[in-house]
Image (cartoon, rainbow, N blue to C red):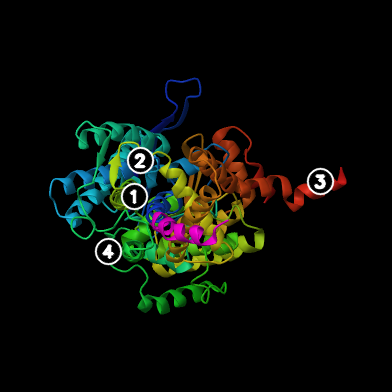
Amino acid sequence: MLEISNISKTFNAGTANEKVVFDGLSLTLNEGDFVTVIGGNGAGKSTMLNLVAGVYPVDGGHIKIDGHDVTKLPEHKRAKYIGRVFQDPRMGTATDMWLEDNLAIAECRGTRRGLGWSLKPSNRARYREMLRELDLGLENRLSTKMGQFSGGQRQAVTLLMATMRKPHLLLLDEHTAALDPKTAAKVLEITDRIVTENKLTTLMVTHNMKDAITHGNRLIMMNAGKIILDISGEEKKNLTVEMLLDAFSKASGAEFANDRALLS
Amino acid sequence: MDIMAWLGTLPGAAAQGLVWGLMAIGVYITYRILDVADLTVDGSIATGAAVCAVLVTNGVNIWIAMLCALLAGALTGTVTGLIHVFFGIPAILSGILTQLMLWSANLIILGGKANLGLPRLKFGDKLLISSDVAVSNGKIFITLGILAAFAAVVILGLYLFLGTKFGAAVRATGNNLNMSRAQGINTNFTKIVGLAISNGVVALAGSLLVQQQGGASVDMGRGAIVYGLAAIVIGEALCARFNTPYVVKQICVLCGGIIYWFVYQTVIFLGLPTEYFKMLSALVVALFLGLPYVRKQYFSKAKKEVKKNA
């Protein structure tokens, strides 16, 4: 489904600020895998997602989605295969546009945008139905500007936008990190439901070890651009936070360096 | 003050307001919808005027001449867009570069001369609108009607375009680049198209302006961006309190243009020398654009609280 093979990436190459993030990272996701990704600060979790999404190009290696080599495709062309939700709730929606405008735009992801009418009255009932399932009271606010919604509501809408046209791959980059715990739990619950219902292949970066353990069927832990732990199936179900911390210090020879992860 | 004489100047001012208001709608597309300050307009309005003037003096039908002006304007916007997108030069600088190129281009279009008058061409014969602003013979009212019709067609056309899937993509591009790319929008392309349409509208206004002023000059676009912004800030002040859709905002911008030229005409009528005009325009625009910042920075509740407690 997703094949990351031997990718490398260095930022600011040749300068004093040179930072080698990846030097030969490989990861393969199977169809329907829901993979949670944890790791310390600067481990390369977000960079990996951004490389897959095409925000910036890889220096070497290949990325394939569903058999299509997307390594050289620009970001907007990869969007055909990928749905994304970001950490910052402001990033996923057009804040000055109506809720239904945003949904209509998302519905065209990966298709040619011609001169057909964007908002069709016949779509409204369907949008309402989808919004009702989010259970956030958004179904009657189609003509409200996105900027007037709370962070949690925006993340839920972004999640809907990422998945209303079924993506081959769903990328969630700490999409609950900016939310309060109660809202975060609600958004995660919606995430679980959407991923399960649509059998989406998903990569979810999280800073919360408990969330990483309870969600998904596979967990990977990253450190310094390498995958140091890859657990799935029965073994993952029996994981505890202590076991993860233990595994981390064994694999990396250091304490887990992510304050937020330890606090939560 | 002679009220009647003052009233007599208003139709002429309204006509000017409509032309510059139409141009401001073009500026609105870049400034508000694409979120780009595009300085191409100072050049592209003159390009529209020059193309129209040259064609019509050479016997080309005025409608075709105006269409060519519009297309030439769209081309100038495309150039700015290409410079911005493919060379990664900031949009504002790309616009300035194109503007300077257009100085030469406009001179070349005008045959190497800085001016081209249209004295022998007559309204109703070769020209669509009249430069005659006298109320007595009524030509000005026909002109006003034609200008209003042009504005209506442009606003309606933009409304239809921005409502399409592609139009929505253009709006999203100006609103949130990240989200647009993540949703598969080719933001380079939408930016170029937006700039092209904007400058097409501006050049169309230029082709009306040249008929209104009875001639084209290579200078005529100087400060156009400022007049456009003036119309936008006045127009937005008109509908600031409402959650208005963009089509209403564009009508407000058009009205903003008319109000601006009413004020201009009145100030001139009261005896202000015309050489102060550009200075005043810039100051007014600076004031209005700065107002939201000033309000937030110096007069917000939080700041006052801090002061009180200090």
Q: Secondary structure at mark 3?
A: helix
Which chain does tag 2 point to?
B
* C-alpha gap between disc 3 and disc 2: 49 Å
Query: Could you tell which of marks 1 and 2 lies nearer the N-terminus?
Result: 1
Q: Which residue is mark 2?
A: B220
Camera-near label (3 vs 2) is 2
Which stretch is magenta?
A: B1-18
Q: Whole-percent x and y of residue B94?
A: 37, 35
Residue at 46% x, 55% y is B257
* C-alpha gap between disc 3 and disc 4: 52 Å
Q: Nearer the viewer, residue B309 or B100?
A: B100
Do callouts 3 and 2 point to residues on the same chain? yes
Q: Secondary structure at mark 4?
A: loop
Q: Which residue is mark 3?
A: B306
Quarter where residue A80 is shown: bottom left
Quarter where residue A83 is shown: bottom left
Which chain does tag 3 point to?
B
Specify few, some or many for label 2: CA neighbours under 10 Å numbering under 14, 14-19, or 20 or more: many
Question: Please, what is the three-letter code of the amino acid marked with disc 1?
Answer: Val
